[in-house]
Amino acid sequence: MAHILAVGGGKGGSGKSFVCANLGVLLAKQGKSVLLIDLDLGTPNLHTMVGVDNPKIGLNNFINKSTNDLSRTAVPTKIPNLYLISSTRCSLEVSNLYYVQKQKIIRAVLQMPSDYVILDLGAGTTYNTLDFFLSAHQGITVFTPEPTSIQNTVQFIKAVYLRKLKHILKQDGFTRIMKKIGYETEDGAVRSPLDIVENIMQMEPERAQMLQRELRKRDFRLVLNQYRKQVDEALGKKIEKVCNRHFYSHFTFLGNITYNERIFESIVAKSVFAEKYPYTPTCTDLKNITSTLTESAPYPSSEQEQHVQI
Amino acid sequence: MSKFEELTYYELLEIPPNASTFEIRQAYKEALSIYSSDSPISYSFFIEEERERILESIENAFATLIDAQKREQYDKRLVAEKKIDPSRVEKGKQKKPTPIFSTKSQAENTISDTIKKRIKKTELTQITEELLSKDLISGDDLKRLRKAVGIEVEEVFEVTRITVPILEAIERDDVPALPSSVYLKNFLRAYAELFHIDAEKVINSYLKNLDRIQGPS
Ligand SMILES: Nc1ncnc2c1ncn2[C@@H]1O[C@H](COP(=O)(O)OP(=O)(O)O)[C@@H](O)[C@H]1O
Ligand SMILES: [Mg+2]
């Protein structure tokens, strides 16, 4: 079975697609077969990042049932071992996928015959994005040093966490418990996910233990992109620390990716950055992140089976 | 958040019970950089009242641990509550485990931090890209990189603990004075990482250049 990585979170423009493309290239160069899937439905641009001009087939062929085999909607890229399923040809309405369609895509992704599948997700916290993110073995969030980006990332992590809570508690239990603990505090502020777990802990200790166990299986990876010298080098590590302290899941900071103006050039030239500029500090960062990602064994997760049950 | 308030002051600041005053100050500064109101991290994470509660705990922890008398009383309480092992509190006697590869003292640590900072602050993009695009990398290339930052071999030693004679041998491509290849690779890696450049590339191209110097054997 393929190892699934999802890249999401943060704001639009933080570099999710850039990270997907370059992670893909570097893994492919190690001889692994890699499939990139553009799941930024509605505003796809991963094909541009990997220099595929106008993919003739893509996710739309799977969604409209012209094929039942997702792997047949992939197109090769200029890089050996690297394939792409684009969603450029999906109609705009497809950004609101039906539940059944989403489940079908997730199931099919798990069956893909590659070593790695990398899911490029859109910004924001729609259920589709969160569920795709949760379907992966490892979820990578990409953010930049700006306070707004950090803020969006934290919101994203909280939303994933809450969504996961919901999955575990299933719909009914979730609404009931939320009502019971008062999801909103007296002054209307929404409780933080951790607060919710603590509250459940007080009311239903058994359930809370199960919750904690399940939440611990979640494996978040953090990447700080567009890093510049003025920025606190330890920023990523600090965020990792706060996340590990205040959520029950497992967070690992993978590293900084240095800001580089040539990324713009490489996109314009329709080539992938890591291929065109392998000896830049930015590429060294990308290589380090790739090896940290592959060396660390993924946290044990039975996410897949669970997901299909839901 | 109740769990956070159950932590001991040591756990809160993430320091051992025998931490020195210096370590306490460092840990406090670090905690503030995360939890204070102008930190983008805490601002995103917590609602106002949560953050204030955490900050208050941190302030209490610092005020207590930095004051010898208060700290002693607090330690006694922790021991009584069986939250820490009495042998762990005895400052000075109980040394922290020493890392295997380093015998650095606190002062040396700050020297090495200063050097690392200096490297970080120097604009090296052009020179590193030039260096890394070469097929063969010589000791002189590495030396030029070091000179661009303006640091001495002794300072490289401070951070990497590669001895000065070996550093000089590396920079002179002095084959007879170089260590065996396993060690050499490790040293080159440490050197490259100090300057934030691709270590694998440096090792390969440096060794390739040595082969060229030595000629067909
Ligand atoms: N490390 C970087 N340095 C400089 N520019 C970057 C970097 N990462 C991304 N960019 C720029 O930011 C733009 C947005 O990146 P993209 O990957 O499309 O973001 P997202 O997928 O998160 O919306 C890209 O077009 C690229 O030019
Ligand atoms: Mg994108």
Image (spheres, rainbow, N blue to C red):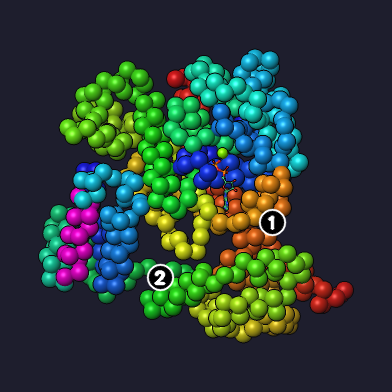
Secondary structure at badge 2 equals loop
Q: Nearer the viewer, residue A148 or B79?
A: A148
Q: Residue furthest top?
A: A65
Residue B62: in magenta span: yes
Q: Is residue A34 visible?
A: no
In the image, the segment drawn in magenta is B53-67
Q: Nearer the viewer, residue B167 or A241?
A: A241
The residue that label 2 is drawn on is B98
Residue A240: x and y, percent?
Answer: 41, 50
For label 1, being within 8 Å of ligand 1 is answered: no
Chain under numbered label 1: A
For residue A208, what is the image quadrant? top left
The residue that label 1 is drawn on is A278
For residue B191, what is the image quadrant? bottom right
Image quarter hosting the N terminus of chain A: top right
Relative to A141, A118 lies left or right:
right
Q: Amino acid at mark 2?
A: Thr
Residue at 56% from the left image edge and 52% from the top image edge:
A289
Image quarter hosting the C terminus of chain A: top left
Relative to A38, B73 lies left or right:
left
Residue at 43% from the left image edge and 46% from the top image edge:
A149
